[in-house]
Amino acid sequence: STISLACEALLDESVIKSPAMATNFIGMINAENKRLGVLVENALRTAVLERGQLVLKKDIHDINRICSEAASNVKLLAEQNQSQIKLELSKESLQASIDKVHFTNVIYNLLDNAIKYSGTQALIKIKTLKKGDNIIIKVIDNGPGMDEQTRKRVFEPFFTTKDIGEGTGLGLSISFAIIEAHGGEMDANSTIGVGTTFILKFPIKA
């Protein structure tokens, strides 16, 4: 609907004569087009996951390194938001059998969400540790947090509220399915006004 309205506006002579207004509407179309692309891509991924057609290409990878690389990739986004990402990685070598592409996307998605929804000057932490035969990853933010009702539904496909922003509602559900496909679990703890912690728990060998 936004793209349609912007296109109609661009047909208006007064808008055409104003480069600033035209640029604004073109920017809106570009942004919405990108968002639509993400929505379609995520919808297709969700369909694949729901049909059980996700094929994992597992190999042994260093979990600490994957977390570090993901943090590095979103560093610029965090800096633009005047936020900081702090790594608190296990001193132990954490090697696990995972699909690197899918698993990295999960970490990236959690960090991206934390940056977007925590406001400016946020502190986002990534913690890793080994517990028995499992590896645990925590992505912690000091953002606005979620109420209990939202927390219980946050992994449902297409679920969005003002508490978790205006995304497609698919990123967390896809991440949840990927962790499950690795034989793991994904959960969230949150307190309004304090922040949110997403917890990944998965076996070292699966």
Image (cartoon, rainbow, N blue to C red):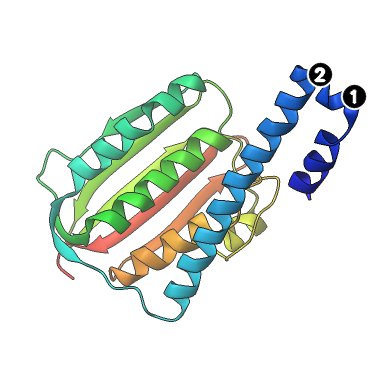
Q: Residue at x 70, y 45 (%)?
A: 162
Q: The residue tagged with tag 1: helix, strand or loop?
A: helix
Give the amino acid type for the residue marked by disc 1 in the picture: Ser
Residue 84 place in picture, x, y as percent:
41, 23
Q: Residue at x 58, y 28 (%)?
A: 119
Going by the image, does 62 lie left or right of 9? left
Give the amino acid type for the residue marked by disc 2 in the picture: Ser
Residue farthest along the bottom direction in this orientation: 51
Residue 65 place in picture, x, y as percent:
18, 41
Q: Nearer the viewer, residue 91 or 77?
A: 77
Going by the image, does 77 lie left or right of 23? left
Is the residue marked by circle 2 packed among few (<14), some (14-19), or many (20+) residues within 10 Å? Answer: few
Q: Quadrant of residue 54?
A: bottom left
Q: Residue at x 65, y 44 (%)?
A: 32
Q: Label 2, on which residue?
A: 18
Going by the image, does 86 lie left or right of 62? right
Separation of disc 1 and disc 2 at Cα? 7 Å
Q: Please count the marks in the image.
A: 2
Q: Nearer the viewer, residue 96 or 199?
A: 96
Q: Label 1, on which residue?
A: 14
Residue 192 in view (yes/no): yes
Residue 185 place in picture, x, y as percent:
36, 65
Pointers 1 and 2 in contact (C-beta within 8 Å): yes
Tell me the quadrant of the picture where the C terminus can be found.
Answer: bottom left
Image height check: is 143 above or below 169?
above
Residue 199 place in picture, x, y as percent:
39, 53
Image height check: is 27 above or below 42?
above
Q: Nearer the viewer, residue 67 or 4?
A: 4
